[in-house]
Image (cartoon, rainbow, N blue to C red):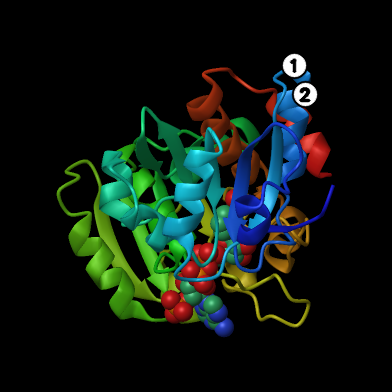
Amino acid sequence: MKHVYTVDDLRNDELPANTKLAVIGNPISHSASPQMHQAALDALKIEMTYVRIQVEPGNVAEAFQLMQEKGFLGCNVTIPHKLEAMQQCDELTDSTKALGVANTIHFKDGKIYGDSTDGPGLVKALHEELGFNVRGSRILLLGAGGGAGKAIATQLAVDGCSELYLSNRTVEKVEQLSADLAHHEATTCYSINNADIALAIIADDLDLIINATSLGMKPDDRPPYPLDALKQKHKVYDAIYNPSETVLLKVAREAGAATANGLSMLVHQGALSFETWTAQTPDTQLMKAAIL
Ligand code: NAP
């Protein structure tokens, strides 16, 4: 079995027997999705194989057509194809329409269905890891203008958080997002820039801080939040899972705050995709162990 397959491999039937699921992206070799999905398939004795397929930009439509011809159930979609994938779909869930991107594709009855499971996956992760309920809460979302950030912000508004502070380096992106979310009446959105002073001022009134920026992936990244403003009463979730403890999480933990990394979001968004394809509930602890 190869670590990464190509669209040529798909076309020429050079995938392992019973390959019915995949993750597509470019690059794709780093993706942990095959480990976690294969573990869940095997545990439920579903005789299917899940692979990585490298797809070049512009080739998503062809990849989907070939997958349908080969009897695939569906696929996950990662950077940079979430928009292109959404554009190939016949049917979209409401959240996918709102976001304009899809990370889960289901081939059924000759149609292509698109869904976005990052936001619901994050909410499940918050509940599981931090015992956190979104409804009525006050949340600061760092990096709200990025791909993951928008998905998370939309879900937090759908789930009725009361105050949502949307922070981003490029503040124009969150001003637009804030306007887009204005019809969620239970949620008041504020857009703020990512200057430490602005973040520190609102810090005291927060229940939860979520990092959805990419700051923290590299050892020399500056923190996405003023570290001396972290308090014991905060809960802190970092969407990053590699490294397993970013500087933000380390300092928050040392301040006595409850913390969790993005592994649980990764697993839960995957589990929701899995349920869409198989109508079965996978063992999320097993999926997590398979990645670790
Ligand atoms: P993205 O679309 O490229 O967004 C990156 C975000 O980080 C943007 O808000 C960007 O701000 C901000 N940013 C980047 N460099 C910055 C800097 N030097 N200073 C301040 N802000 C900076 O990426 P993404 O797909 O949303 O991913 C974001 C993070 O979430 C990554 O760490 C990724 O690993 C993680 N993630 C985790 C999961 C999971 O399942 N756990 C899923 C998806 C993503 P601008 O808008 O101003 O550029």
The kind of residue tagged 1 is Lys
Ligand 1 occupies quarter: bottom right
Q: Position of residue 207 (x, y in %)?
A: 48, 47
Q: Is residue 277 left or right of residue 136?
A: right
Q: Locate residue 26: give its quadrant.
A: bottom right
Tell me the residue that label 2 is attached to. 42
- Mark pair 1, 2: CA separation: 5 Å
Q: Residue at x 39, y 41 (%)?
A: 115
Q: Is residue 122 left or right of residue 1?
A: left
Using a 10 Å C-alpha cutoff, classify the residue at mark 2 as few (fewer than 14 neighbours), some (14 to 19) or many (20 or more).
Answer: few
Residue 166's disc number: none
Residue 237 visible somewhere in the drawing: no
Helix or strand or loop: what does disc 2 sit on? helix
The residue lying toward the viewer, choosing from 234 and 277, is 277
Q: Position of residue 108 (x, y in %)?
A: 40, 30
The kind of residue tagged 2 is Asp
Labels 1 & 2 near each other (Cβ < 8 A): yes
Residue 45's disc number: 1
Q: Is residue 94 left or right of residue 203?
A: left
Mark 2 vs ligand 1: CB under 8 Å?
Answer: no
Using a 10 Å C-alpha cutoff, classify the residue at mark 1 as few (fewer than 14 neighbours), some (14 to 19) or many (20 or more).
Answer: few
